[in-house]
């Protein structure tokens, strides 16, 4: 099991040569698993613009790309895996020759560098499902990022690390050749499951490495009967039983998982095996835009020495970060080891979830604050992965926009969404987990008319779920969505639990609800033969 503290990894070995000839790389100055302090030195010396914040975090910049490039992700089409992969707008195919060309291009670039950085670490806290990962990069910032995001080995584990299962060649400062077959831009992020390699060209955004590993786990884990999940997870401090929270951006997943009454298993990527839940990562990669000590105290205090602050703005005089400044990017981020979270459970593993919570921010204002789902409904809501975003205003309020991301993690899926949904349904039935749909969005009308659900009410709902207080509460069946609507909850006004009753015009509510239900049907139809839309509407 990896060490439970921020370790030095190998001390003196970090400063010696590390032979990469087996990877076709001959650079002599290679720092392997260097300590954060050494990587700070390297970044300040060799990366112009990199500096240190007034709280001690390393401030780094990813250049032109400040977010992922999903349209430039490619999976190698190989006879051994091509029948498994859900090809289409998420997974674009790449032939083996083009992958080899891009890999050679990345190695050629890395061989021109004076010094390289290697991170050898693990993905997956459960030793049964753990993989060994090697990252080869030319930027100390990237090395520090992956040192924090992967699971750090002990000195003994590193000495006996051997050959990795997967290698990331990060040559992000060097562009892909647009004339190469299959390239649509100068950015390309290529994954080969068969060769165990990831090649990054034309983007220095660190999150591409993190999500490259998640894509790999999303392929490997279902092959072994493990449900890989894009979710946060917490555990009861006494029983060790867990709860998982799925939700797209803006639904409150990170906020609600930062619960001081419970232990944090992880904030983003997990596996659910026959033994329980485990975190895939060794760190957290939190959004930093509009961050404050008052709003997110756990995240704020974690952004100290050893952490990476990405694409933030700071003042020259004091190096104080202005988290409200989005002039570089709305996607400012902070990466830090999970040990920096005071209520983290180490190792990051827990028992089977008693509760599975789907968070949605419904800007149409028609979904109830909390509903109970059957396993069949859970599969369909999971595949839909619904939330809604506000379109903006122009001479009044425009209509909200429905957003769907299969399994609440569409860009990172490899198998067809039904594969993950079937695994989820099997886990729910086997372990008798309760499944809940929690609306953190609007009540009393759509955005512009109604009001956002109070965070205090949502916290009370989640607390009641974890306390088992809602399991035996009577429910009413919603006639449009077939949801089993909870009729009472401690700390929540009863009158807001039925959304139709909160609207001043019930007819307008019915029209809005039917419109959203139609969107649900149309979206789900693409994932099912015949588009039966059973579980969701038939209850």
Image (spheres, helix red, strand yellow):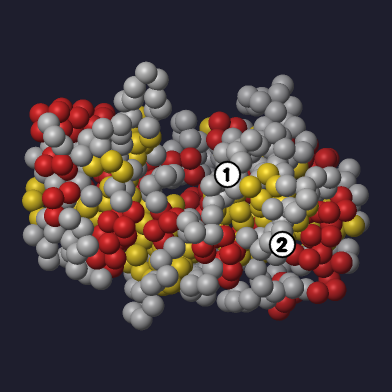
Say left or right for 245 vs 208: left
Nearest to the observer: residue 295 or residue 38: 295
Q: Name the residue under label 1.
A: 324
Picture coordinates of residue 193, whole percent (x, y)? 58, 48
Q: Which of the two labelled residues, at mark 2 and mark 1, occupies the earlier sequence position? A: 2
Nearest to the observer: residue 71 or residue 38: 38
Q: Can residue 320 be seen in this view?
A: yes
Residue at image coords 80%, 45%: 49
Residue at image coords 89%, 43%: 112
Is 495 rendered above or below residue 527?
A: below
Nearest to the observer: residue 140 or residue 196: 140
Say left or right for 510 vs 128: left
Task: Residue lying at the far front in this picture: please name it.
Answer: 317
Task: Residue lying at the far top in this picture: please name it.
Answer: 395
Picture coordinates of residue 79, whole percent (x, y)? 53, 40
Is 154 rendered above or below residue 479?
A: below
Residue at image coords 59%, 35%: 69
- Could you say whether the residue bearing mark 1 is in a helix, strand or loop? loop
Picture coordinates of residue 256, whole percent (x, y)? 39, 58
Q: Mark 2 points at which residue?
A: 56
């Amino acid at each position: 099991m990896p060490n439970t503290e921020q370790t030095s990894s190998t001390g003196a070995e970090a400063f010696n040569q590390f032979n990469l000839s087996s990877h076709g790389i001959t650079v002599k100055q290679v720092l392997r698993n260097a300590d954060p302090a050494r990587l700070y030195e390297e970044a300040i010396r060799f990366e112009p613009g990199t500096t240190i914040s007034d709280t001690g975090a390393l401030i780094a910049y990813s250049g032109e790309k400040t977010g992922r490039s999903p349209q430039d992700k490619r999976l190698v089409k190989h006879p051994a895996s091509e029948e498994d992969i859900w090809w289409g707008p998420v997974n674009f195919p790449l032939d083996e020759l083009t992958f080899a060309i891009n890999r050679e291009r990345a190695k050629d670039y890395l061989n021109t560098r004076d010094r390289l950085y290697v991170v050898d670490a693990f993905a997956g806290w459960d030793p049964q499902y753990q993989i060994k990962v090697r990252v080869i990069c030319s930027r100390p910032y990237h090395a520090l990022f992956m040192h924090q995001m992967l699971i750090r080995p002990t000195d003994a584990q590193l000495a006996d690390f051997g050959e990795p299962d997967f290698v990331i060649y990060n040559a992000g400062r060097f562009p892909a050749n647009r004339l190469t077959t299959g390239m649509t831009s100068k950015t390309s992020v290529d994954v080969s499951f068969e060769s165990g390699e990831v090649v990054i060209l034309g983007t220095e955004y660190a999150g591409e490495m993190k999500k490259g590993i998640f894509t790999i786990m999303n392929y490997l884990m279902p092959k072994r009967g493990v449900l890989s999940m894009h979710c946060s997870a917490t555990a009861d401090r006494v029983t060790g039983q867990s709860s998982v929270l799925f939700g797209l951006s803006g639904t409150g997943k990170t906020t609600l998982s930062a619960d001081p009454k419970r232990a944090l298993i992880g904030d983003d990527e997990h596996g659910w095996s026959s033994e329980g839940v485990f975190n895939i990562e060794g760190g957290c990669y939190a959004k930093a835009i509009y961050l404050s000590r008052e709003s997110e105290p756990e995240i704020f205090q974690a952004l100290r020495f050893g952490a990476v602050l990405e694409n933030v703005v700071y003042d020259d005089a004091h190096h104080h970060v202005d988290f409200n400044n989005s002039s570089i990017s709305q996607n400012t981020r902070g990466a830090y080891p999970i040990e920096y979270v005071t209520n983290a459970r180490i190792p990051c593993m827990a028992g089977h979830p008693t509760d599975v919570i789907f968070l949605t921010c419904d800007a149409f204002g028609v979904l109830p604050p909390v509903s109970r789902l059957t396993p069949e409904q859970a599969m369909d809501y999971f595949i839909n992965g619904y939330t809604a975003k506000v379109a903006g205003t122009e001479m009044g309020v425009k209509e909200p926009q429905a957003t769907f991301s299969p399994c609440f993690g569409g860009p990172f899926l490899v198998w067809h969404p039904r594969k993950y949904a079937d695994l989820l349904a099997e886990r729910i039935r086997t372990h008798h987990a309760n499944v809940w749909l929690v609306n953190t969005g609007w009540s009393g009308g759509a955005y512009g008319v109604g009001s956002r659900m109070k965070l205090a009410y949502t916290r009370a709902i989640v607390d009641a779920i974890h306390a088992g207080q809602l399991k035996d509460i009577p429910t009413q069946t919603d006639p449009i969505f077939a949801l089993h609507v909870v009729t009472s909850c401690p700390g929540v006004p009863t009158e807001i639990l039925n959304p139709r009753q909160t609207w001043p015009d019930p007819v307008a509510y019915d029209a809005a609800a039917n419109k959203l239900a139609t969107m649900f049907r149309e979206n789900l139809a693409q994932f099912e033969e015949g588009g039966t839309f059973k579980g969701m509407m038939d209850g």
